[in-house]
Amino acid sequence: MPKIVDHQARREEIAEALWRVVRRDGVGAATVRSIAAEAGWSPSALRHYFTTQAELLAFAMEHVITRVRARIETTDFHGPVRVAVRRLLEELLPMDAERRAEAEVWLQLTARAQGDPSATDWLRRADDGVGEAATLAVRALAEEGELAGDRDADFEAARLHALLDGLTVHVLARPESMPPERMSAVLAAHLEDLAT
């Protein structure tokens, strides 16, 4: 009887190996050969799933997006709107080891993607996901009267998006200066400011 292979599970195993290489050695070290070695595979077996490094990197970013969405889908958003919005947005910030790993991979892949036309799509999709969350958050606040009437919702969504990106980069650059509690407090203060 032929062996049944779970191809999605194998692709995820490859993505996890790629993440380990990127976090340990940098995105420049993420070659088909190094990822295969990290996963305990032969390069030819890896090429069965990904024929180029660009495909590998695209899948790694897709893996980040999938993990974040899955986590958001299981988050409890009951309670006051400002608390629920903060919970949503904290899922996008490096508040723990898992989210920090996602952020590190995202940042390295983003830097690598600059000037690479093949990376434009997945880079835009990752950025759009953060933008959509910021827009959703501002709309929810507005619907519940938690956005001051003179504030432009589109502008505030863009400002919130920039805050999320800025906090993420700041934490990755200097983790000791922005522990999770402080990051949460900065975000909470910003959300409170939107109501005034």
Image: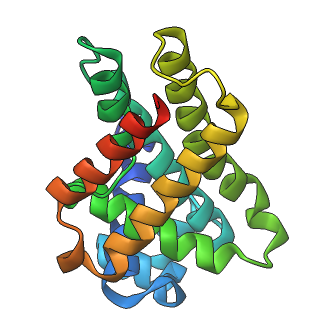
Relative placement, left or right, of 148 versus 119 is left
| Residue 71 appears in the figure | no
Q: Position of residue 34 (x, y in %)?
A: 42, 85
Q: Nearer the viewer, residue 112 or 75?
A: 75
Quadrant in the rendering for residue 172: bottom left
Q: Nearer the viewer, residue 125 or 183?
A: 183
Residue under the image location 54 percent in, 46 percent down? 160
Q: Which residue ends up furthest to the right in the rendered image?
A: 117
Location of residue 107 with respect to 196 vertically, above or below: below
Location of residue 23 with respect to 189 vertically, above or below: below
| Residue 20 appears in the figure | yes
Quarter of the N terminus within the rendering:
top left
Q: Nearer the viewer, residue 98 or 193?
A: 193
Residue under the image location 56 percent in, 71 percent down? 109
Q: Position of residue 10 (x, y in %)?
A: 38, 50
Residue under the image location 33 percent in, 34 percent down? 86
- Tally the numbered discs: 0
Q: Nearer the viewer, residue 78 or 36?
A: 78
Relative placement, left or right, of 102 versus 148 is left
Q: Position of residue 132 (x, y in %)?
A: 61, 34
Location of residue 76 with respect to 60 vertically, above or below: above
Q: Position of residue 39 (x, y in %)?
A: 32, 70
Relative placement, left or right, of 124 versus 66 is right
Q: How is the image coloured?
A: rainbow
